[in-house]
Image: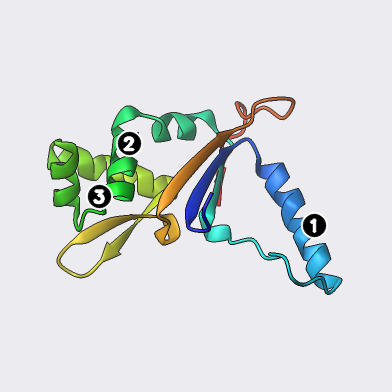
Amino acid sequence: MGTDTLRITVGQGEEHRTAARERLRRAEAGERGERIEQDAQFVLNFEDFGDVETLMRTSNLDLLEAIATQRPESIRQTAAVVDRDYREVHRNLEQLESLGVIEFDDDGQTKRPILRGGADSVDISFSIGSNSVGDRHEASA
């Protein structure tokens, strides 16, 4: 996974917090040489299956693929790339923005959808187990 990969996880919030505490402990101890800081803009964890369901809709995954591979310059161009109605694509992009997966680069005339933090790819990881995701209702960034 590259350094410009948006990592989307499900049910792994505690693991992220533990890893962050460990990095902080090592940095405070003066450890150098290996990557200590977490690039938080490239990690997004969901704790609610409703958010995961929204993200995993085929229409939304198609949009993420188009944004990552085609790099459309506007919402209209994004709609053309996926061969869908502009209004529907606009609504889906707003959903992805509300989840924190994409952002809009606004140059005044057009809104260009980009992956969060300017990432160039997406990695999605699920963890279901003793600390299951189902009853929590928040998305953390």
Q: Residues within 10 Å of mark 2 (few under 14, many from 20)?
A: some
Q: Which residue is identified by label 1? A: 22
Q: Is residue 9 left or right of residue 19?
A: left
Report the Cα–Cα distance between label 1 and label 2: 35 Å
At 26% from the left and 66% from the top, the residue drawn is 106
Circle 1: residue type: Glu
At 40% from the left and 47% from the top, the residue drawn is 98
Closer to the camera, 99 or 80? 80
Circle 2: residue type: Asn
Please report whichever mark, 3 or 2, sits nearer to the chain's N-terminal start: 2
* Front disc: 1 or 3: 3
Report the Cα–Cα distance between label 1 and label 3: 38 Å
Q: Which residue is identified by label 3? A: 70
Q: Is residue 88 left or right of residue 105?
A: left
Please report whichever mark, 1 or 2, sits nearer to the chain's N-terminal start: 1
Disc 3 to disc 2: CB gap under 8 Å = no
49 above or below 118? above
Q: Is residue 63 left or right of residue 84?
A: right
Where is residue 100? Give x, y as percent.
44, 50
Q: From this viewpoint, is residue 138 visible?
A: no
Report the Cα–Cα distance between label 3 and label 2: 15 Å
Q: Is residue 31 left or right of residue 84?
A: right
Q: How many marks?
A: 3
At 58% from the left and 59% from the top, the residue drawn is 40
Q: Secondary structure at mark 3?
A: helix
Q: Indicate the quadrant where residue 122 lies.
A: top left
Q: Indicate the quadrant where residue 38 lies.
A: bottom right
Where is residue 111? Give x, y as percent.
22, 60
Q: From this viewpoint, is residue 103 visible?
A: yes
Circle 3: residue type: Gln
Q: Which residue is identified by label 2? A: 60
